Amino acid sequence: MLSPRALTDLPFFEYLVAPDAEPEQGGSYDVVHFNGASFADVRAENTRFTECAFSSVDLTGTRLRDSRWNDVWLTAAQMINTDLAEATWLDTEVVTSVLAGTALFDAKLSRVSFFGCKLISVNLRGATLRDVAFVDCTLRDVDFSETTLTGVTFTGSELKDTVFDKATMKKVDLRGTTGLGIKSGYDSLKGAIVSDTQLMELAPALAQTLGLVVKRS
């Protein structure tokens, strides 16, 4: 099973430097370590982060729309009502962080791992997720409507009131979930992998969605 890295495990750890200032709109940041800072309500749209680390950073209300995150590591980050719509995340790792009311619609996430995170009312509508892993996470009221999910896993994670309306799935492995609470979008589960036990649990909702009438013989 995947496991999170420590800060010192990062291949660029020895090159990290402290930032000169808070992120700003259109800024470009390479091998920067943002540590224990608050960037609440900062405007930093169209910003690029490459080989950066974020430790215990408060991004509440931060506007990071259309930002790019390449080989970034975040731990204990607070992303409350953070605007990350249309952002691109590549080879990014998020550890024990909270995303609540976070806008990630139309975002592109590729080779991204979430470890021990809480995702509450996160908007991923229209996003593209490829090779994304949720490990030991809690996902509550997460909206995957019209999202394209490829090679996504949910090992040790609990889904509650999850929305999959008009989502497209390919090799989405749901077998590792500790709870599979789906609010809507059962007809979008084509391409998902479930266990036989999960199939039995999903059967009534699937039958209702397909309009099947089940009667005793």
Image: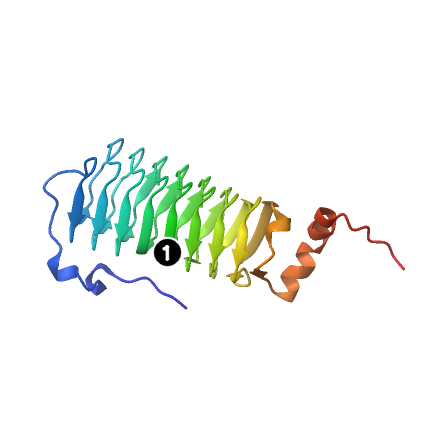
Left or right position of 94 against 213 = left
- The amino acid sitting under disc 1 is Ser
- Tag 1, which secondary structure? strand
- Position of residue 152 relative to residue 141, above or below, is below
Left or right position of 184 against 92 = right
Q: Residue at x 42, y 40 (%)?
A: 105
Coordinates of residue 107 in the picture (x, y in percent):
38, 45
Q: Residue at x 35, y 65 (%)?
A: 3
* Residue matched to label 1: 110
Coordinates of residue 77 in the picture (x, y in percent):
30, 46
Closest to the observer: 140 or 128? 128
Pick the quarter of the image with the C terminus: bottom right
Total numbered labels placed on residues in the image:
1
Left or right position of 101 against 55 = right
Q: Residue at x 37, y 56 (%)?
A: 110
Q: Residue furthest bottom?
A: 1
Pick the quarter of the image with the N terminus: bottom left
Coordinates of residue 67 in the picture (x, y in percent):
28, 42
Residue 123 is drawn in which quadrant? top left
Q: Residues within 10 Å of mark 1 (few under 14, many from 20)?
A: many
